[in-house]
Image (cartoon, rainbow, N blue to C red):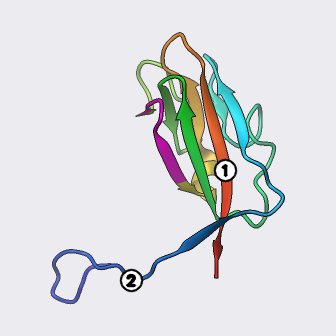
Amino acid sequence: MRNSSGGGFQVVATAQLAPVPDVEMSEITVADTALALVGEAGIEALDAKTTVVVVQIEAATVRFTDDGTDPVATTHGFRAYDGQTLIWSVATAARARFVREGGTSAKLKVGQYKHST
């Protein structure tokens, strides 16, 4: 939100996140075929209490899209590197698709969180 003088930004709220109870972290292998984060070979479904999804990339670089289209290992999609963490809304996570960029499969560690009060 822009401040009243029209310049810069100001924090209007902060949020605390907590893990969704009874939902364990998931691990997904990303190989040379594009897959959805949710459904297919990914997480079967997000818990109804989930409001934020955290994805950490491990072992290799991946490409991803957040619009439901398939990424292509060499030409299409955003790059995410080994060690990078992505923080998404449920809607974005539901559209996300991944493919590995090189010859080494990556692992995605996926956590589900909710806003706490």
On screen, residue 62 above or below 87: above
Q: What kind of element bears circle 1?
A: strand
What number is the disc on residue 111? 1
Residue type indicated by callout 1: Gly
- Viewer-proximal residue among 79 and 16: 16
Question: Residue 28 location, x and y as percent?
Answer: 70, 32
Which residue range is magenta in the image?
A: 80-87
Residue at the image position 26 percent from the left and 79 percent from the top: 2
Residue 67 appears in the figure: yes
Badge 2 is on which residue? 12
Question: Residue 8 location, x and y as percent?
Answer: 19, 74
In the image, is 105 to the left or to the right of 61?
right
In the image, is 10 to the left or to the right of 33?
left
Q: What kind of element bears circle 2?
A: loop
- Determine the residue located farthest toward the bottom in the rendered image: 4
Residue at the image position 24 percent from the left and 84 percent from the top: 3
On screen, residue 36 above or below 19: above
- Quarter location, residue 17: bottom right
- Quarter location, residue 42: top right
Check the picture and name the quadrant holding the C terminus: bottom right
Specify few, some or many for label 2: CA neighbours under 10 Å numbering under 14, 14-19, or 20 or more: few
